[in-house]
Amino acid sequence: MYDIQDYQEALTLSEAAETLARNPRMRIIAGGTDLLIKLHGGQIEAAELLSIRKIEALSHIEKMPDGAIGIGPLATFTQITQDPVIKTDIPILAEAAVSMGGPQIRNIATIGGNVCNGATSADSASSLLALEAELTLISSRGTRVLPISEFYLGPGKVDLRAGELLTEIRILPQHYVGFGGHYIKFAMRKAMDIATLGVAVLCKLETGNILAEVKIGLGVAGPTPLRCLEAEAYAAGKVISMDVLNEVGRLAIRSAKARTSWRASKEYREHLIQELVPRALREAIVQAGGGEIA
Ligand SMILES: Cc1cc2nc3c(=O)[nH]c(=O)nc-3n(C[C@H](O)[C@H](O)[C@H](O)COP(=O)(O)OP(=O)(O)OC[C@H]3O[C@@H](n4cnc5c(N)ncnc54)[C@H](O)[C@@H]3O)c2cc1C
């Protein structure tokens, strides 16, 4: 049923890196909520697993003196929804986290697993893209720091090289301070469902009614989570109005690479982008200190 050939547990980061270097076939297991489903479904055979769950240094959520927020990959979704730093400084990530799975899954599923699994529907991904998160990846060869926008290579494919593990997700202050944000998960059910579309919008205002900066991350709008750079460039410097917001929604479709799946057609997903991007931006404006738009 679960074709597991070997299972080891690392207690420290260096132990994990050395074990992976000795045996490149080993797969990391964190919460196991993606990996065990694949094993159960026969997508992975003769698995050799390295559990990182006991590495205490990977569960932190902390704000550094320079304002950067570091999130350990083992932070669970429950931890993220409840953490005071996340709730105060980057509440968009708490919104995304609470929309994920149900309480049992949120208690065990980790943010690192959500990112490294590489699914376009990952609920944390669009917010982390809008927040321009940086990923720290270590191996016995050394450390790499990568913008999350470069991490996603294709459906279920990420830039994780042999023997590497994700050790931190970092959000720099210039990417969150002064921004308001909002995440909308559109799914067929209100809970326990995978997103048909995920929309994360952050914005910063100038003198209350001008959009200084807008950042839009979309999930399930293409084979990987993506940013809507054309819509973002259009929005910068515009006086807030419903016409501007609707144009941002229209332009966001141009960055999408939506496709038809059993969940929704390409056309329906594009319709959702046009509707939900302005809706998320409208709420992000309120969160950033602006007024309601008539
Ligand atoms: C019932 C159910 C409901 C779900 N609902 C949702 C949902 O609503 N939204 C959503 O986004 N997801 C959902 N998921 C998917 C899943 O729970 C998440 O993607 C979860 O965050 C994966 O984390 P994990 O710790 O369980 O990862 P694991 O299954 O342990 O690992 C996933 C992948 O990441 C790799 N990995 C894990 N940690 C690291 C690391 N530190 N460094 C390098 N590689 C690593 C593993 O090798 C594996 O390839 C659901 C799953 C189930 C079973």
Image (cartoon, rainbow, N blue to C red):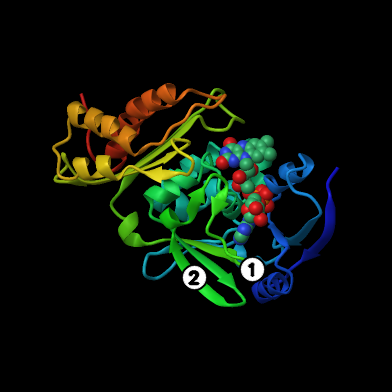
Look at the image and tell me in which quarter the N terminus lies. top right
Q: Which residue is mark 1?
A: 163
The relative height of residue 170 versus residue 211 in the rendered view (above or below) is: below
Name the spot of residue 146 as percent of width and height, x first.
Answer: 45, 63
- Where is residue 230, by image quadrant? top left
Q: Position of residue 35 (x, y in %)?
A: 70, 48
- Residue 126 is at least partly visible in this image: yes
Under mark 2, the amino acid is Arg
Q: Secondary structure at mark 1?
A: loop
Q: Residues within 10 Å of mark 2 (few under 14, many from 20)?
A: few
206 relative to 262 in the view: left or right: left
Closest to the observer, 210 or 24: 24
Measured in 3D between alpha carbons, the distance from the residue under mark 2 to the one under mark 1, in whole angstroms, is 12 Å
Would you say the beta carbon of the disc 1 residue lies within 8 angstroms of ligand 1?
Answer: no
Quick check: 53 left or right of 179?
Answer: right
Kindly tell me whether residue 292 is visible in this rendering.
no
Quadrant in which residue 69 is drawn = bottom left
Badge 2 marks a residue whose secondary structure is strand
Vertical position of residue 8 compared to residue 47: above or below: below
Quadrant where the image shows the C terminus: top left
**Image coords of residue 235 (percent x, y):** 21, 40
**Mark 1 surroundings within 10 Å by alpha-carbon count, few (fewer than 14), some (14 through 19), many (20 or more):** many
Q: Which of disc 1 and disc 2 is earlier in sequence? A: 2
Instruction: State the residue at coordinates (49%, 26%).
Output: 260
Say the numbered circle drawn on residue 144.
2
Residue type, mark 1 in image: Gly
**Which numbered marker is on residue 272?**
none
Q: Relative to residue 285, is residue 104 drawn left or right?
A: right
Mark 2 touches mark 1? (CB < 8 Å): no
Question: Which residue corresponds to the image point at 34% horizontal and 39% vertical from the top-left?
Answer: 255
Whether residue 146 sits left or right of residue 173 in the image: it is right
Horizontal and vertical percent position of residue 157: 56, 51
